[in-house]
Each structure stands twice: as C-alpha cells, then as structure tokens.
Amino acid sequence: MLKTRVLTAVVLLAVLLSALFLLPRNGWIAFCALFLGIAAWEWGSLAALAALRRSVYATLVVGLFVVPVFLEAAWANGLYAPAWVYYAGAFFWIILVPLWIWRRPHIVSRVWLLAAGTVVLLPAAAALVDLRSVAPSLLLAVLATVWISDTAAYLIGMRFGKHKLAPIISPGKTWEGVAGALAAVALYALGWASLGGPMGMPVWPGGAPGWILPVLLGLAVVGMIGDLFESLIKRQAGVKDSGTFLPGHGGLLDRIDAPVAVLPLAVLAFVR
C-alpha cells in the first residue's frame, strides 16, 4: 500500500508540474476543468447522487467554470473569475465552515450539499488560473504551503500526538500536529521572505516582507479547516474515501481538501 501511495503521489506531482509549467493558458484551463469534473463527480457521490445525476452535476460545475473562456470575459484587474467569487469563497471558509464543523448539522437536503460543493470547488478552480497567471511559481509556492503543513502535521502528530483535535470528525488529527504544522509553515514563510517571494515576486503587494508570516500561517489554518470539513462530509456520507481515482490515496477530493480552501484566499492575498 505504501509503495502504491508513493508511486501515485510521484506521478500526480509530475503531471501537475508538467501542466503547470508547459501548458498554454487555455491548455491549463482545460487541465483544471478535467480535475474539477472529477472532483465534482466525487462530491456528487458524497451527496448520494446516482451516476446520471452525478454526471449532470459535474457537467454543470465544469460549465460554470469555463464560461469566462467562451465569453472571453476579463473581470476587474484581469481576473479569470469576478472578485466576488473569491470573497464568497473566503466567507464560506472563514465563517460558515467553522460554524458547520462546530454545529455538525446533518444536511438532509441534497440541494444544500451540492450548493456547498459548488462553493468549495469553483473558486478553487478559478484560483488555479489566476494564481498561475501571475506566475506558475506563485501557485506552486502556495500549494507548497499546504503540502508542508500537511506533512508536518502528520509526522509530528504521529510522533508526539496525544491531544485530539476533533476526535468525532477526524480521530487521527492532534493539537501537537497542528503546532508542528504551524512551526513548519513559519519556517517556510521566513525562507519565502528572505528570498523575496517566488521568482522575485514581492511577498506582499506594497508591504513589508514580515507580512508573509501571518499570511501563510492563516492559509495553513484555513487548509486545516478544509481538511476537517471534508472529513465531516465523508463521515456524514458514511464513507472513508471520496472515491478511488488515486490508487493508495482514495479519491481526488481526499488529496485536495486543504488546497480548495486555501486557493481562493491566496488570490485575495497575492493577486488583488
């Protein structure tokens, strides 16, 4: 299982890096649309939709994502998606999701769950386009924040974890893992600031390098919220994994639960 997991991760990273640095803009949008469709399909499964309805849902979500391509729309500041999409995503992750996790309501209506899935996936997919438009290295640096946080949380939690973070939702996560993740991201932020940002990009538009520390720590916390939120949705759906798309890992949603929360906020932090 470990060998399969590592091999899948290596292949997925190679595909991502190749697409990130080699594809033209429309090719990258098509690449993002493909993965968005898979993620929407899996979300439809969590909402207990039959295959046909899942296909319709995934098609609608992807259709909304590619609308700017067909309209040749250029929103304010040249963003792929209008700014309100990112603000809606930020409101969802910073306000609504923590309340959702705290109250743990069991959503009976599929409409509400599918609407939530749209808010989870669409801003994140659009953010992939807008962050890459600034610089592929910026998008990679933002994703690295999530990867560093997740890896540190796992390793520190396995070694020192004693106090459960959310035992009902995700029994494996600990407060020690959270502390380790934040410490690792803090070191990453200091490295980012000392280098002046990805490929020489300013670490904060018009601001001081020190701002990058609270920004990346905030993104790391939001990523943890995203992780817990998907764990809650899966638990309520009665499944361990969102799918079987990635051998050894489960579904695509299982690997992007933190990035989908972080990406819209990263646009607000680094692009606007």
Image: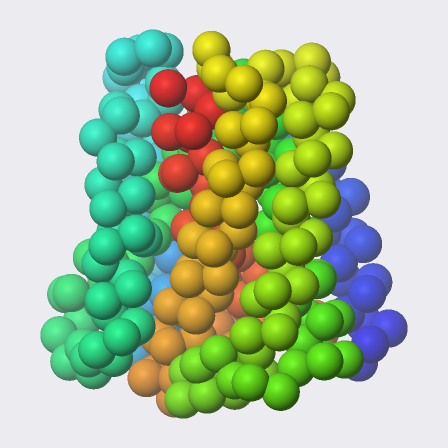
Q: Image point 57% across, 37% down: which residue?
A: 213
Up/down of 215 relative to 148, above or below: above
117 or 191, which lies in front? 191
Query: Where's residue 23, x and y in %?
Result: 65, 24
Q: Does any portion of residue 24 appear in the rendered image?
A: no
Query: Where's residue 150, x and y in %?
Result: 63, 61
Q: Image point 13% across, 74% down: which residue?
A: 109
Query: Where's residue 146, x and y in %?
Result: 60, 50
150 or 33, which lies in front? 150
Quadrant showing the N terminus: bottom right
Up/down of 258 relative to 200, above or below: below
* Side of 155 where 244 appears, left or right: left
Q: Image point 62% across, 15% down: which residue?
A: 201
Query: Where's residue 114, x and y in %?
Result: 23, 62
Up/down of 252 relative to 156, above or below: above
Q: Image point 43% across, 29% down: which residue?
A: 269
The colour scheme applied to this rendered structure is rainbow
* Side of 216 where 114 appears, left or right: left
Quadrant showing the C terminus: top left
Q: How many marks?
A: 0
Q: Does any portion of residue 111 appear in the rendered image?
A: yes
93 or 134, which lies in front? 93
In the displayed orientation, state which residue is furthest to the right: 3
